[in-house]
Image: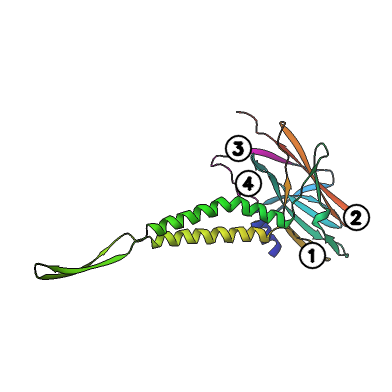
């Protein structure tokens, strides 16, 4: 059950707009997973997964849309060891290729973290500038006292207080940082999968610059002596 809850949040992180850095009205490419004879579509908590059976069964997320300016296809992978043998999941053994056989980079968790930090850098700078601007315009209460024609007076005047605005900006910064760290915690890591265990995480696969109406991307995931291959067809949306 814990794995299923993790998968539910993992697939939320794979939403097309998450950390995409796209324009407010992005265009999307269509991503169609291609099922082989040894694979089937299954559903976990309403999420569609392309499942490849073996001593260790591997499920891959079926992303359906990709922002047209994306450099990477983000995929969720799930591993379930139904055998009585332990297996190592080693990311440096993963590989990806385009339809012409050209190698595509599969990012390490460290490289994924760098990419995410780069994507949110502009947001962090913007929030910092908002906070600086609010501080410059900060206000408070002033006390006035004196004597006019022998009469003593005193009083206070309140000028605009930006404390709520600054608190909201700080909250936005903390929320952004928390979301970034949460995503990083879901990156797929090297893992020894013992009998009966399951493991899941996110990987990023580089996509080539689109030079034709459609192209294919294949991901090879070796586990032990078995290699699980996942093929995705990426195409431009049909013109209206």
Where is mark 2, residue-wise?
225
**Would residue 156 appear left or right of 127 to someone viewing this image?**
left
Q: Residues within 10 Å of mark 4 (few under 14, many from 20)?
A: some
Q: Residues within 10 Å of mark 1 (few under 14, many from 20)?
A: some
The location of residue 166, given as percent across then percent down, is 43, 60
Secondary element under disc 1, as helix, strand or loop, is loop
In front: label 1 or label 3? 3
Can I make out residue 224 in this image?
yes
Secondary element under disc 2, as helix, strand or loop, is loop
In front: label 2 or label 1? 2
Residue stretch rendered in magenta on the structure: 14-32
The location of residue 237, given as percent across then percent down, is 65, 33
**Residue furthest out toward the left:** 149
Q: Quadrant of residue 87?
A: bottom right
- How far is mark 2 from mark 4, CA to CA? 33 Å
* First along the sequence among labels 2 and 1: 1
Q: Does residue 28 show up magenta in the picture?
A: yes
Q: Does residue 181 show up magenta in the picture?
A: no
In front of the other: 139 or 179: 139
The location of residue 65, given as percent across then percent down, is 65, 42
What is the quadrant of the C terminus in the image?
A: top right
Q: At 50% from the left edge and 52% from the top edge, which residue is drawn? A: 126
Where is mark 1, residue-wise?
197
- How far is mark 2 from mark 1, CA to CA? 18 Å
Main secondary structure of the magenta stretch: loop
Q: At 69% from the left edge and 46% from the top edge, which residue is drawn? A: 72
- How far is mark 3 from mark 4, CA to CA? 11 Å
Where is mark 4, residue-wise?
16
Q: Quadrant of residue 112?
A: bottom right
């Amino acid at each position: 059950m814990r794995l299923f809850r993790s998968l539910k949040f993992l697939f939320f992180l794979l939403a097309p707009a998450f950390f995409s850095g796209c324009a407010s009205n992005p265009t999307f490419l269509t991503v169609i997973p291609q099922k082989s004879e040894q694979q089937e579509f299954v559903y976990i908590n309403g999420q569609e997964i392309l499942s490849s059976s073996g001593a260790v069964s591997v499920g891959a997320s079926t992303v359906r849309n990709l922002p047209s300016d994306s450099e990477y296809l983000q995929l969720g992978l799930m591993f379930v060891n139904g055998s009585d043998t332990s297996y190592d999941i080693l990311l440096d053994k993963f590989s990806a290729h385009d339809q012409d056989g050209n190698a595509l980079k599969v990012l390490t968790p460290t490289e994924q973290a760098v990419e995410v930090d780069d994507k949110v850098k502009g947001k962090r700078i913007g929030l910092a500038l908002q906070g600086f601007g609010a501080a410059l315009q900060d206000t408070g209460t002033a006390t006035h006292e004196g004597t006019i024609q022998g009469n003593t007076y005193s009083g206070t005047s309140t000028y605009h207080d930006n404390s709520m605005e600054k608190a909201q900006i700080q909250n936005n910064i903390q929320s952004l940082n928390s979301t970034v760290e949460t995503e990083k915690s879901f990156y797929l890591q090297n893992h020894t999968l013992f009998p009966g265990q399951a493991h899941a995480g996110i990987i990023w696969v580089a996509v080539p610059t689109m030079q034709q109406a459609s192209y294919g991307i294949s991901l090879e995931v070796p586990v032990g002596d078995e290699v699980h291959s996942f093929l995705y067809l990426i195409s431009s949306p049909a013109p209206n």
